[in-house]
Amino acid sequence: MHSMLKTRNLRFALGLALLSLPATLAAQAPQWKPYPFLADGFTASFPSKPEVEKQTVNSDAGPLEIRTYTAEDSGVALIAAVCDYGAAAAGKDPDTLLDSAKQGAVGNVKGRLVSEKKITLDANHGVAFEAENDSAHLFARIYLVGTTLYQLIVVAPLQTPYADSARFLDSLQLAPRSHTEAAAAPPPAADWKPYPYPADGFSASFPSKPSFDKQNVATGTGTAEYHSYTAEDAATALIAGVTDFGPTLAGKDPDVILQGAKNGAVTNSKGKLVSEKPITLGASHGIEFVIDSDSARVTARVYLVGTSIYELIVASPLNSNYADTTRFLDSLKLIDRVGK
């Protein structure tokens, strides 16, 4: 049977090596509460309102619709997934179906099984297991309720214990299904508009107000302050980043610096370079490149403007084809700096 494991890591770490730039989404303070999804017959607690997505996948039983409810907390993905197998599961051994789902989940993350045990939920058969790959630790509980498979999954960075794993996994409760509630409410419409940042000398368009973060990063001669502006659109992260390196970059060949940034991004994302081309922003040199990793596609434009590096990054789940990539990347405009 097809495993419903679908992780959405909205925190795509580019880590441009030359700049030591952490391309991560700013975390918000968690506000845990139960969220009912009566059309799918369950409630579960999340630290923020989960995003809803549905997808049709092929399986041995034919096309199946999977609905996922996903939230993030400090780089950890919390996922509830539901799939009704209908007649394909009727009369089948529950433990066999659950074992198949478990094996599919471990295989999809190219991981290894760490532990497993049988569990129940209101007399329904289930399995709890942990798996690891090179970068992540997976905690999962899967239940077969009638012909419907329910999964709760915690995906955390490797060797980074998540304190609320049990809180999330324990929160699943079955509820009477309501056929009047939409199974997947559409997300709010994006409200694209330009956001100016005079202190950093640029403006860029986002679908919602971006979060701001700053961090000191190491350079060859000390430290520099990295400013990032991040918004999300569905499962895609849109990031604008700025670092002023001052005299560190004075007199250096712009194209060598930009190639270093690109090569660092490929290495740190453990991905492969799909394409690259030289670009300009006014008279400033730049480079555009695309990287694919096992789970994400990153499209980036990086420019050297004086002694400052500007970057615009779109990080999306692999094969998702984010429609507004060009809209975001084309929106960067240089403006007069204030306070510099």
Image (cartoon, grey):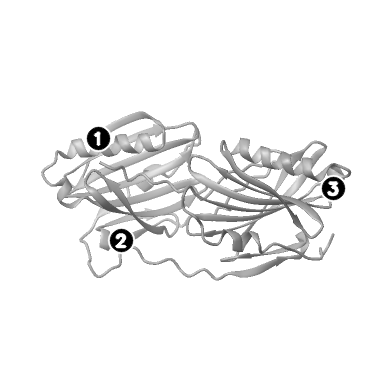
Q: Is residue 200 above or below residue 98?
A: below
Q: Is 77 left or right of 151, judged from the image as shown? A: right
- The residue carrying pointer 1 sits among few (fewer than 14), some (14 to 19) or many (20 or more) residues within 10 Å by Cα, namely some
Q: Position of residue 206 (x, y in %)?
A: 60, 64
Which mark identifies residue 37?
Answer: 2
**Tag 2–tag 1 contact (CB < 8 Å):** no
Front residue of this view, candidates 318 and 228: 318
Q: Is residue 61 above or below residue 47?
A: above
Q: Residue at x 74, y 44 (%)?
A: 258
Amino acid beneath label 3: Gly
Which type of secondary structure does the marked residue at label 1 adopt?
helix
Q: Position of residue 244 (x, y in %)?
A: 79, 50
Q: Quadrant of residue 292?
A: top right
**Tag 1–tag 3 contact (CB < 8 Å):** no
Q: Position of residue 97 (x, y in %)?
A: 21, 39
- How far is disc 2 from disc 3 in space, using C-alphas? 52 Å
Q: Is 212 left or right of 51, judged from the image as shown? A: right
- The residue carrying pointer 3 sits among few (fewer than 14), some (14 to 19) or many (20 or more) residues within 10 Å by Cα, namely few
Amino acid beneath label 1: Asp
Give the label, 2 or 1, closer to the camera.
1
Q: Earlier in the sequence, mark 1 or mark 3?
A: 1
Q: Residue at x 31, y 61 (%)?
A: 36
Quadrant of the snapshot with the N terminus: top left
**Tag 2–tag 3 contact (CB < 8 Å):** no
| Residue carrying label 3 | 246
Q: Is 179 left or right of 280, judged from the image as shown? A: left
Give the label, 2 or 3, closer to the camera.
3
Which type of secondary structure does the marked residue at label 3 adopt?
helix
Quadrant of the snapshot with the C terminus: bottom right
Amino acid beneath label 2: Phe
| Residue carrying label 1 | 99
Q: Is residue 210 visible?
A: no
